[in-house]
Amino acid sequence: MGTHDVPESVRALSALSRIDYVDHFTLFTDAVDAGDATPEQWARAMFGDVPDAGEWLIWRGLLGLRLSRGRSPDTVAGWRITGRGEDWIRLEAGSSFLTGNLVVQATHGRVSLTTFLRYDSLLGHGVWPPLSAVHRRLVPGVLRGAAAKMHGRRPRP
């Protein structure tokens, strides 16, 4: 797992008109090969149906993202589902200063989470860079936790 160059085929899954920030993390797992794990199931294993307190603090409190409330087949943790394919799903949320896509891909023995951001004002340029370091530390644990859920185990810290 880690941040590395994002292939053009992955970049093409973003719906943003411009990409100012992107990172891409991949976890190799046998849960995908079982054929039971759709990208939406992986997204829900990562983030749940509604944001937890920590997600709410970061997404709504720090980033000001406008998230849907309550459970819905059209959202994952308050993020709107704005696109999907056989092996991917795209979530979107925005605030007054940035818009984000989270793309979850599940295929060929791996699951990936790609974060795309567009800064919609100067505030986005100032807020996200320091938070991105925290984000990059959290994402590997999010992937491992989702894999543990998909395998029916308790997540490792």
Image (cartoon, helix red, strand yellow):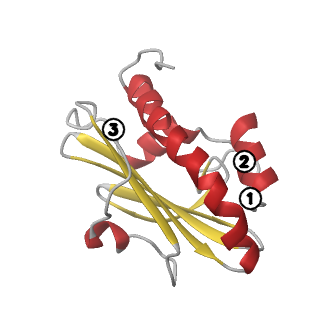
Quadrant of the frame with the N terminus: top left
| Residue 155 falls left or right of residue 120 | left
Q: Residue at 33%, 56% (x, y): give it.
A: 4
The image position of residue 138, as x and y in percent, is 54, 39
Question: Residue at label 2?
Answer: 58
User: Is the C-beta separation of discs 2 and 1 under 8 Å?
Assistant: yes
Question: Residue at label 3?
Answer: 37
* Foreground of the two, 55 or 45: 55
| Residue 118 falls left or right of residue 96 | left
Question: Which numbered tag is attached to residue 63?
Answer: 1
How far apart marks 3 and 1 lie (CA) works out to 30 Å
* Foreground of the two, 121 or 94: 121
Can residue 52 be seen by looking at this rendering? no
| Residue 147 falls left or right of residue 122 | left
Please give the count of numbered marks on the rendered protein. Answer: 3
Relative height, residue 114 to residue 116 (above, below):
above
Q: Residue at 18%, 45% (x, y): give it.
A: 108
Question: Which numbered tag is attached to residue 89?
Answer: none
Q: Amino acid at mark 3?
A: Ala
- Name, please, the residue furthest toward the top: 154
- Name, please, the residue furthest toward the bottom: 17
Q: Amino acid at mark 2?
A: Ile
| Residue 131 falls left or right of residue 97 | left
Can residue 95 be seen by looking at this rendering? yes
How far apart marks 2 and 3 lie (CA) works out to 27 Å
Among the two numbered marks 2 and 3 on one chain, the one whose residue lies closer to the N terminus:
3
Give the mark toward the camera: 2 or 3. Answer: 2
Q: Residues within 10 Å of mark 3 (few under 14, many from 20)?
A: some
**Local secondary structure at mark 2:** helix
The image position of residue 30, as x and y in percent, is 22, 30
Give the mark toward the camera: 3 or 1. Answer: 1
